[in-house]
Amino acid sequence: MDNLAIDHVQLPVPAGEQALLRHFYAGLLGLQERRGDGGAALRFAAGPQRLDFLPVSGPALPARASHLALRVRNLPGLRARLAADGWSLDAVAGASGAPRFYVRDPAGHLLELLEAPPATGGLL
């Protein structure tokens, strides 16, 4: 196969968490909210890639070992914004030595945020 890329990732969230997700993903991370196609999913985009959050009734438990990694620009600035907003952050130096940290979103999904290499730019 040629030209493989991720189109979107869909994650479960407890119903009623839309305002917190909008604040976190659009307000703090800077992703653009996208209108859905009539479905219940809340969508955010970074370029052509999309994060879809599907409200579910009952507990929407995120997987403990899985995480979503996002390359960003200005990692220190993003870290400062999240910390100022009260989010708990875990600093990690990856095997490559690239700066990164982890944070859980309002639904409990683990995000790894790492600095995009200068030559490739970044999503945020």
Image (cartoon, rainbow, N blue to C red):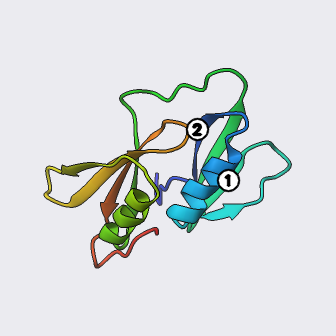
Q: CA distance from mark 2 to mark 1?
A: 10 Å
> Does 75 appear above or below 40?
below
Q: Is residue 65 above or below residue 46?
A: above
Q: Position of residue 113 (x, y in %)?
A: 35, 56
* Direction from residue 76 to residue 36 in the image, left or right: right
Identify the residue shown where x is 73% and y is 38%: 16
| Image point (59%, 62%), residue name | 26
Percent coordinates x, y for residue 115 in the rendering: 30, 66
Q: Position of residue 86 (x, y in %)?
A: 43, 52
Q: Residue at x 58, y 64 (%)?
A: 27
Density class for disc 1 (Cα within 10 Å; few <14, some 14-19, many ≥20) is: many
Number of numbered markers? 2
- Identify the residue position indicated by label 2 in the image: 11
Q: Earlier in the sequence, mark 2 or mark 1?
A: 2
Q: Which residue is mark 1?
A: 43
Furthest-top residue in this view: 58
**Is residue 116 among the parts visible in the rendering?**
no
Residue closest to the eye, 120 or 77: 77
Task: Residue type at mark 1: give it.
Answer: Arg
The residue carrying pointer 2 sits among few (fewer than 14), some (14 to 19) or many (20 or more) residues within 10 Å by Cα, namely: some
Question: Residue 24: which disc?
Answer: none
Q: SS class of the residue under badge 2?
A: strand
Residue 120 coordinates in the image, percent (x, y): 34, 74
Looking at the picture, tell me which residue is in the foreground, 86 or 77. 86
Q: Are marks 2 and 1 in contact (CB under 8 Å)?
A: no
